[in-house]
Image (cartoon, rainbow, N blue to C red):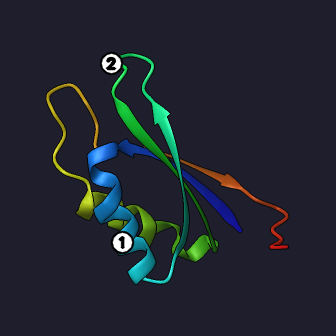
């Protein structure tokens, strides 16, 4: 199991979350603020199987709007989640 931690612009959150859910992914949205430009961001926590990490990243590439000069569409961290449990 992998945990995909993604930081995207607030304006991209709706289309990204809708597409993730439509393709069967579960996602948790956490409001956040960028440290450098202090703009509204959203942090998405996406738990998925290892073989589904690339499709998640593909959705981000597809649904995040083009970046402004010097910025990125998304920042993505993929970490191991050795234990996953829903209670």
The reply to whether callout 2 and callout 1 are in contact (CB within 8 Å) is: no
Residue 42 percent location from the top left of the image? 44, 44
Circle nearer the N terminus (2, 1): 1
Give the CA separation, mark 2 to mark 1: 26 Å
Q: Which residue appears at 49% of the width and 41% of the height?
A: 31
The residue wearing badge 1 is 18
**Quarter of the figure with residue 22:** bottom left
Classify mark 1: residues with Cα within 10 Å, few (<14), some (14-19) or many (20+): few
Vertical arrangement, residue 41 with respect to residue 56, above or below: above
Q: Which mark is residue 78?
A: none
Depicted 69 relative to depicted 31: above or below = above
> Which residue bears the numbered disc 2?
37
Q: Quadrant of residue 38?
A: top left
User: Residue 74's x, y, as percent?
Assistant: 36, 44
Which quarter of the rendering shows the N terminus? bottom right
Q: Residue at x 72, y 56 (%)?
A: 80
x and y percentages locating residue 11 in the rendered image: 26, 47
């Amino acid at each position: 199991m992998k945990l995909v931690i993604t930081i995207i612009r607030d304006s991209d959150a709706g289309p990204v979350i809708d597409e993730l859910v439509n393709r069967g992914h579960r996602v948790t949205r956490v409001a956040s603020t960028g440290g450098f430009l202090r703009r509204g961001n959203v942090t998405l926590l996406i738990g998925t199987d290892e073989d589904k990490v690339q499709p998640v990243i593909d959705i981000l590439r597809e649904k995040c709007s083009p970046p402004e000069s010097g910025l990125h569409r998304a920042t993505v961290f993929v970490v191991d989640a050795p234990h996953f449990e829903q209670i």
